[in-house]
Image: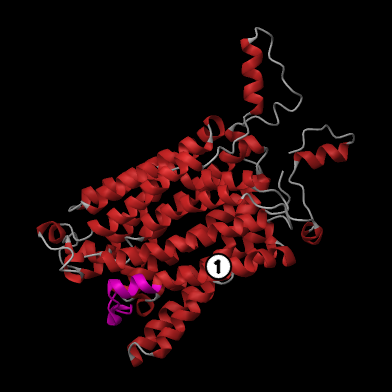
Amino acid sequence: MSSSAAPSDSGIDANERTTLLDAVQQSQKKATPLPKLQISILLLALLVEPIASQSIYPYINQLVSELDITGGDERKVGYYAGLIESLFFATQALTILQWSRTSDRIGRKPVLLLGIFGLSLSMFCFGLSRSLLALILSRCITGALNGNTGVMKSMMGELTDSTNMAQGFSLMPVAWSLGATIGPMIGGVLEHPQQHFPNIFPGAFWSQFPYFLPSAVAAGFALTCFLTILFFLKETLPRQQTQEKSISALDGDAPIVPDNAIEDSPVSIYSLFEPSVLIPVANYGCIATLEIAMFALQPLFYSTPIELGGLGFDPVTIGLWMGAFGIVNGVLQTMIFAPLVNNFGPKTVFRCCEAGFIPIFALFPITNLIARQYGINWLVWFSLTCSLLLGVFVDMTFGCILMFITAAAPNKRSLGATNGLAQMTASIVRAIGPAMSTSMFAYSVQHKLMGGYAVYAVFVIMCIFVMRFAAKLPGSIEKK
């Protein structure tokens, strides 16, 4: 935010609200080059969470069945799988706002390091878990210590300006997609290594802990990122004012408070509860709800037998197919996201891509009906491919909404709190989403509601209501 006082009432008003900049004028500015090394390290750190969280997706339903948590009732697997998937976000929702606000005061890097270390520890614990309680505790450790996502979004906002924001934020979904590619492949290929690679992994340990290897690989990658960040990533939080005040105090003089000291200091959490901040945050929560429901339903749909409403895929097939989405998503996001935003504006791109959720949820029952009629044939794979491509455009909504959230921050020193509020909202709905969606799936199948497809009808209706709320976003944005 500019620190100079405005000479007129209109200028004051412009400083008090989010300034809008026409997308055409923005595209005419020469983009500032991105700091490649720092952003590369930041994107490397962003890989950690999707690898760790999504590596369990291909086998979580099988793990629940093997531990006999459901008492042999396969129809109840969805309830417990959704619970385990939700716990990370539930515990994260309780702590992420405080971690983000802490990063506004002590710096982004210490909070980022702590979160990655905690995630690595929890993945080791998850791989060694042989009971429902142990699985729950390991997921809770991950969420409670992990404030990474909000902090990394704040760092990206501090490393970019209004001329290269679209380019910078377009890389975050690409990194996430790469992690979403690697994660399911790790989980699908490395689970039960004694069966898949008996010559390399003999012994009773791998038989007793068949899911330790994918968990250990994810944890090892997190430790590698921890060391890279520790030695090479620079702090991005502005420190100049804090240093000036400290020096003045040491000299025995009264601290000199600049005119813009209040503007450039972290604000209270209550000052974030205004429409300019809450509207982007609420839209972020809406798309996070739909996205986590989609990702929770996909592995359950893929693994459920055809006669019960799924496709009957094994964990290897699930992992490879979910990994294929990450590859396609990463390539297309890199190529088309920034040009789309520069040409049409973030709001238009956001609303058009958000509409893609409707056909995605509609394709679930259509694909199952094809499989029931003809088996797993080319029509099934064509339907899955259409869903995959639609998922790429849906994922672009996150790059757009992150730009709105960054621009909504009252000042630079409150960017962490603003992103923390947004991420807390997303974590709450992501905590509810997996358990809600998978339980709705299990209930629909168990009671044959709408032929077992009622869960998809609910989410299609939800998509229609969510799209109307996106109209309240500002037409275009400018970073403060």
Residue at x 25% of width, y 58% of height: 213
Instruction: Work out which quarter of the rendered image holds the C terminus and state it.
Output: top right
Q: Is residue 146 left or right of residue 165?
A: left
Q: Which residue appears farthest toward the right when viewing the image? A: 8
Image coordinates of residue 55 in percent, x first then y, are 34, 60
Label 1: how many Cα within 10 Å (few below 14, some 14–19, many 20+): many
Residue drawn where x is 60% and y is 34% of the image: 270
Q: Amino acid at mark 1?
A: Val
User: Does 61 sit above or below residue 172?
Assistant: below
Residue 173 in view here: yes
Residue 345 pos. (x, y %) = 72, 62
Report the magenta residues as a range.
304-321
**Does the stretch in magenta take in 307?**
yes
270 over 381 or under it: above or below: above
Residue 286 location, x and y as percent? 54, 58
- Asked if residue 354 can be seen in this view, the reply is no
Residue 140 falls in image quadrant = top left
Disc 1: which residue? 394
Instruction: Say above or below: 297 vs 373.
Output: above
Q: Residue furthest top?
A: 252
> From what the image shows, is residue 427 above or below residue 179?
above
Query: Observer-nearest residue: 135 or 53?
Result: 53
Taking 1 as reference, is 130 left or right? left
Residue 20 position, x and y percent, is: 77, 51
User: Is residue 341 located in the magenta-colored stretch of the structure?
Assistant: no
- Residue at x 64%, y 45% (from the top left corner): 277
Q: Is residue 11 left or right of residue 33?
A: right
Q: Quadrant of residue 305?
A: bottom left
Q: Nearer the viewer, residue 298 or 258?
A: 258
Q: Look at 28% across and 71% down and name the residue there.
A: 315
